[in-house]
Image (tube, rainbow, N blue to C red):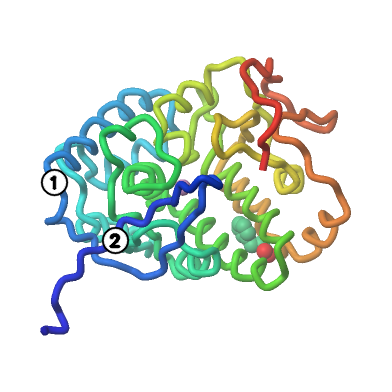
Amino acid sequence: MSAQAPVQPRRVENLHTDKGKVPVYATGVVDQNWGGYTAEDHATWATLFERQRRLLVGRASEAFLTAQDAMGMTPDRIPKYDDLNAVLEPATGWRLIGVEGLLPELDFFEHLANRRFPVTWWIRRPDQIDYIEEPDLFHDLFGHVPLLMNPVFADYMAAYGRGGVKAHGIGAEALQNLTRLYWYTVEFGLIREADGLRIYGSGIVSSSGESVHALESPAPNRIGFDLERIMRTRYRIDTYQKTYFVIDSFEQLMAATGPDFTPIYARLAEQPSIPAGTVLDSDAVFQRGTGEGWSTDGDV
Ligand code: PHE
Ligand code: CO
């Protein structure tokens, strides 16, 4: 047997048992195995890409749209990581690596700290076009990768990775505080631009329903960025968010997250968490949500 025999990467998805969903973690770095994509896989990419680009012009942040164009992502076919890396690495030093699915937290943080962004190699099936629980190639590549071209955001992501390694050493509560920050910025963040609010969070830009909901629905709260407030706020994993947090710029995000979080974690440990839909007197409110359609339980 040749040591170079190509190994077909696995498709690691959550297990669904009679006791509910069990997340499964992958660990290894794998080849994208681009030649292994079927015509159906490329068609899924094309459908999702075209639908989202149409929705996102005028809704996504300028930085996101510009970067996506600069990277040469097109609907024609699933991009090759190597081709994207040829543009990304010289721009900000980030590089995409293939993974089989969700990584254990520490592995994920270490990749980010070293400017390696893990991208799930497989794309969702046609029956999962509108919703899939776990991150797939479309979410990771279309949603996360473009902003890695932005120098300030690129630095934020690497700093987050270093902060993650540190929080992992401090304990579970610190990690929970930091995860909320990722959720409300990297995944579900909004940014205030000259013409109004725009989306930069990957979880929003990769979802057709939430791309409209996050900006246009009267249901959710839209509140100004506040680091410690966000780190106390619970969130939703299986419905649209009840609250979105708005930054003024990526520079603001970078500056606010620059200080050492160690004393912040200690302070937050004394304070209760905030439910996902609560508005506080101290909040800078852009929009107070009507709460329409909210389910009463299930904040994590
Ligand atoms: N400053 C944070 C810390 O000391 C690290 C961090 C930077 C976290 C940027 C998130 C984003 O832990
Ligand atoms: Co994501």
Which label lies toward us, 1 or 2?
2
Residue 93 found in image quarter = bottom left
Residue occupying the point 39% across, 60% down: 118
Taking the image as shown, residue 194 lies to the left or right of residue 300, namely left
Q: Quadrant of the C terminus?
A: top right
* Disc 1 crowd, CA 10 A, few/some/many (<14, 14-19, 20+): few
* Disc 2 crowd, CA 10 A, few/some/many (<14, 14-19, 20+): few
Residue that mark 1 sits on:
38
Question: Toward the viewer: 240 or 165?
Answer: 240
Local secondary structure at mark 2: loop
Residue occupying the point 22% across, 45% down: 72
Q: Position of residue 273 (x, y in %)?
A: 79, 44
Residue occupying the point 41% across, 32% down: 207
Q: Position of residue 71 (x, y in %)?
A: 27, 47
Local secondary structure at mark 1: loop
Residue that mark 2 sits on:
10
Amino acid type shown at disc 2: Arg
CA gap between label 1 and label 2 equals 15 Å
